[in-house]
Image (spheres, coloured by chain):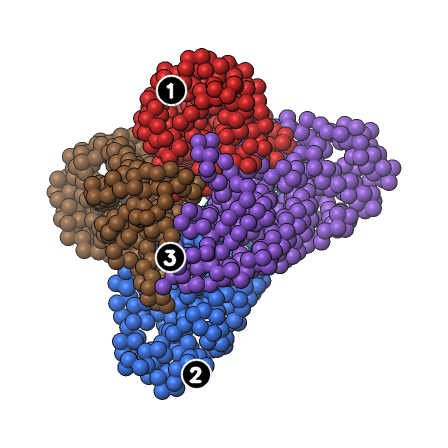
Chain colours: A brown, B blue, C purple, D red
């Protein structure tokens, strides 16, 4: 889905994230599909399914590959791999064509390239999460001892300090960082099962090749997961947790910034076309928006668990519509969080305010 | 959200729709925002808030406007209107600046431009819906009398004809066309309330200007709906109904195309990178995917009904993340439906199959 | 789904609504299924499919029916109708058994009884909606002229009056009342199509009986809608709009009740087990909760539009899990709204507060 | 939410699970809340906040407690704890009242009792999951070597064996069992933070009492998680995975049971009120329904991550509306899975069917 409204510049990067989007973009993703195909060709030679010479021809073609009309192929086939493989083969003498993709299937290529993409994205997101945690800690250093009225159920509860609130912000983020390490272990596996998810079909070499490709790509082999989408769900779950915790921070900031409450002062902040005096907590609001968006997408991604038979075109494509958008939203939310937290000029109950009863 | 995975060419137009996306794109949308601003300037002159000469200067600047860095503005302000207005004013002598946007607010501009966009999109979608209905009717003419076993709860039920199935496809689509006319009436209204949704603030001229702008844009005036998002929900509801009914067709086609069932033959169809004999019902599957996607988005869009106070930045932006994507998905689903239905070479229980008991 | 946590008394009626639940309860629903069966038996006699005498026997059995083990039947058949029909037939001499249900199917009974249920529920909900609107109007009479700072994007915007806020609460509710009338027209139709949704199968009398039943039940006949679930979606959409608008009110009230803002004073309100000084805006919070719950359910109900072939057991049952809960949640939200609005002791910017710049 | 339609006997246990529901029911849950209160009273004495004698009085009252009108209390306070505490105190001499609940807050009681509930539920569900896995393995023993055509994208792909399909069913279930062990570790912690989630407020004894209570309840202490709902999300995620994998099995079974495909024969199965010859795969369909239901609920539960300030009444209650229903739906899905798998009389491509090309 293009969603040109939020991605064509009108809203800047308020609701998008160019760096994360770039990892899912055609150029980067085709690069990762080619890494798979190169490793597969290598494996075919190692397993003596094809000659070293044919493999060398094929590898040269893979290396030279500079784009093809994958869009037309996808419009016809529902995914870009058949067109990619055909384009590679067109560059080869008849005899060498077997050195490309033989025994592999589109899902092997796309799922494995998707894993490589997700691992890179996870790196980018955890780097940002590190910085967001650091920003919370910097605030705690500066303002932790200041008084801040604790509020429960939208009502003033008891006197407390800024540290109580900041610790409630920081704690889940640190836990999400630890969860990211477990997630990485769960995610990191090639998905290679050949056409029907059986490594001995259509030929015994698929299993051996799978092992070689896994090693070449630096990923564990693990069992086939063609119709078990728990890994994709685990990533979605983590993205939901992260944006959820950031949405909590965004909501808190927006509440603290209200006139009459005045528990936070942000430098910068959004201007109004009608009211020059206003300082809208734009990024804090976007954190709430993105959290609600990602939360809901997880409920849609989860529909893709119902993956009929040996491969569901319908369920699989639902992952493509949701997960990349969730990852990008998480990237944007982390960016906003870092910006908001870094722009805090003051935090805590304003002087002269009575403590709650 | 960019979702580069599904919008950067890798998947062609399987999961996107360039024509619908174009209506939400910056160029088209800025054009509609400028139509609002031009009508507002005109109204300011008509109401004698500004002189005819100042208005003429402003209108010339609006006409000349050839883009500005709205992205940077949106990153700062959360929406592009403050930067747009500032860019227009920069082109004007000090005295004439009041002839731009005075008394209007960002939400007036964006909501009204969004209504214009949605009405255009609704036109495009109903045109396609017309063609899909025609395609179903053409099938009924060709194959309606052929036998087709009715199936309930995934089990053969009773002998019937192809007409029974096709009529169940056609009937809701025709009803959705009728609903589109009611939706158009509901959607078609400017949203003008000034900064706080009160037409008498910040000045009495807002109410008069609102009437002039509505007339100039060819939209009814109606009451302010700044914090009542029922109209956006109504559009989302219609998109959900349309894609839902198309998803039902796609599911039926995929079930009919199964080996052993063989109730439909499609010409064309998707190729496999591993199995040359396969003809995957790619577009039918995509119709299911897009239906599930849009269905879920409606549950997220609905969260935006909780629109606090006089304007919620967080709730409002949730509409921007969901509605344009839903409209685009509906466009893609209609395109696929027309293609699938036009590619039917045969429909009905294959000869030599026993009727159910 | 039982959800014993929220329905077994632990939370009173905070998150449930006994009066609405009662309409969906076995006793009430079986009563409506029996109304269908009685009308059908009558129609069979009128159409001369069975003798008047056999019909009289059958009607007597239907009238006498005092419950049967429908649960066991549903566990076996997935719905209660086969067991209900069998129980009725067991009371009849062999010859008269044809006077019960002949030509009808389970879906005819359940969908039509569901329509009757939904219309009754709609009456209950619109009565409450009337009272909520009256409560808003009463507040406007008492407090409309008081000053209230308008707030946009969680920031003080401009001075305004309580009337501005109350009018934004009232306007969508009044519109929802008007929409309820349209919804009633859309909902009000029997669903009678016989086993495969074709009124001429298994016998021509089904079409004639359908007309008689419609008249007897006081519902229009209309076309078959066995696999077109748009009507159920329309009800869900209306429930989502109503709870959404109430959620907005609840959110506003919770924000107004904050210490430091103090724009509303509620009498009564929730106690805390730890902090005796607190007055939690419990019902206002519940309005937000219920709105988010119903919003999300609409995205699940919408998945049921993908209703394969002539009847989908899987999609149909998804309606049963969502719609009754959505209706009940709406009932609870309306109840809370009336209570909250009736408990307002004061509304408006507190004296001595500076107006925004 | 009551959802009387699916829980009042009309549908038997098709869409509910009495055993799981019983764990969330008032009696069971009040029992767990009393375990908390008893442990807290003990801790107060151990920490010398109250005398041993007062504690003994309080413990006797807790032990004697035989129900109170918690519903009325919840209607007023939004949760049952204030009424429960008041009822306990009413049984005590004035001086001993401090031995009940002092320093604890409603959230401590409810969250901790919910953890105990969830751990018990997890036990029940994993026992059932064990049996479902055993049922798949029994099928593999009986039918694994039989031919079954692999199907991808709803099209016959390559010849394979039943073992391929069954292994794809079994593998994720075994993984979910392993995930249950990790989930248990994540879930198992008391939630004790006192009124504002700070263990040193309102008094230093809260922290010490928290440790004693954790030990008494056999749960780790861990940090406060009053506003970090990741644990509840983790449970929801696991329920979504389990029902998703079961939904895949249900969908596969329904597809295999189609006439023309005939890859599975189930003994028993649902009857039709209109067509005596039909055997509807009722439980398989219910597995799909429940999977889609739980999937969507996770997207709603996730909205509860946005938990403002030190306690959000609105977000918290959203957990209560979703999680217990998700757990119950998972229980029902596991029950159906065991029944379906145990009723398989035959599985595999029927004799005399041509293998795909």
| Callout 3: SS | strand
Q: Is residue D133 above or below residue B47?
A: above
Residue assigned mark 2: B48
Please, which chain is the residue tagged with disc 1 on? D
Q: Residues within 10 Å of mark 2 (few under 14, many from 20)?
A: few
* Both marks 1 and 2 on one chain: no
| Callout 2: SS | loop
* Both marks 2 and 3 on one chain: no
Q: Nearer the viewer, mark 1 or mark 2?
A: 1
Residue A251 image position (x, y, % from top left):
36, 47
Q: Nearer the viewer, mark 1 or mark 3?
A: 1
> Who is closer to the viewer here, D132 or B143?
D132
Q: CA distance from mark 1 to mark 2?
A: 76 Å
Residue assigned mark 1: D49
Disc assigned to residue B33: none
Disc assigned to residue C155: 3
Please, which chain is the residue tagged with disc 3 on? C
Report the side of B106 relative to C308 (left or right): left
The structure residue drawn at horizontal position 42% and vertical position 30%, both measured from the top left corner, is: D105
């Amino acid at each position: 889905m293009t969603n040109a409204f939020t991605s064509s510049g009108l809203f800047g990067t308020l609701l998008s994230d160019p760096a994360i989007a770039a990892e899912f973009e055609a150029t980067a993703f085709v690069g990762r599909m080619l890494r798979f195909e190169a490793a597969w060709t290598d494996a075919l030679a190692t397993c003596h399914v094809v000659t070293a010479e044919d493999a060398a021809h094929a590898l040269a073609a893979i290396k030279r590959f500079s784009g093809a009309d994958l869009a037309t192929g996808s419009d016809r086939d529902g995914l870009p791999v058949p067109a990619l493989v055909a384009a590679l083969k067109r560059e080869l003498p008849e005899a060498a064509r077997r050195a490309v993709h033989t025994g592999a299937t589109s899902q092997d290529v796309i799922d494995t390239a998707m894993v490589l993409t997700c691992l890179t994205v996870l790196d980018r997101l955890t780097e940002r999460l590190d910085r967001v945690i650091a920003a919370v800690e910097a605030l705690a250093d500066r303002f932790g001892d200041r008084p801040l009225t604790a509020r429960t159920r939208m009502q003033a509860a008891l006197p407390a300090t800024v540290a109580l609130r900041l610790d409630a912000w920081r704690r889940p983020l640190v836990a999400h960082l630890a969860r990211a390490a477990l997630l990485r272990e769960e995610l990191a596996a090639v998905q290679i099962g050949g056409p029907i998810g059986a490594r001995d079909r259509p030929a015994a070499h698929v299993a051996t090749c799978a092992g070689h490709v896994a090693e070449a790509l630096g990923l564990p082999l693990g069992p086939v997961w063609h119709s078990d989408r728990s890994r994709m769900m685990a990533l979605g779950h983590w993205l939901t947790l992260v944006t959820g915790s950031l949405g909590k921070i965004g909501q808190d900031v927006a509440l603290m910034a209200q006139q009459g409450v005045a528990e936070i002062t942000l430098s910068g902040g959004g201007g109004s076309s009608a009211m020059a005096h206003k300082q809208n907590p734009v990024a804090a609001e976007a954190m709430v928006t993105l959290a609600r968006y990602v939360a809901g997408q997880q409920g849609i991604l989860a529909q893709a668990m119902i993956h009929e038979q040996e491969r569901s075109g319908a369920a699989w494509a639902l992952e493509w519509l949701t997960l990349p958008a969730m990852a990008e939203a998480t990237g944007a939310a982390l960016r906003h969080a870092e910006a908001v937290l870094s722009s805090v000029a003051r935090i805590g109950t304003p002087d002269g305010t009575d403590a709650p009863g």
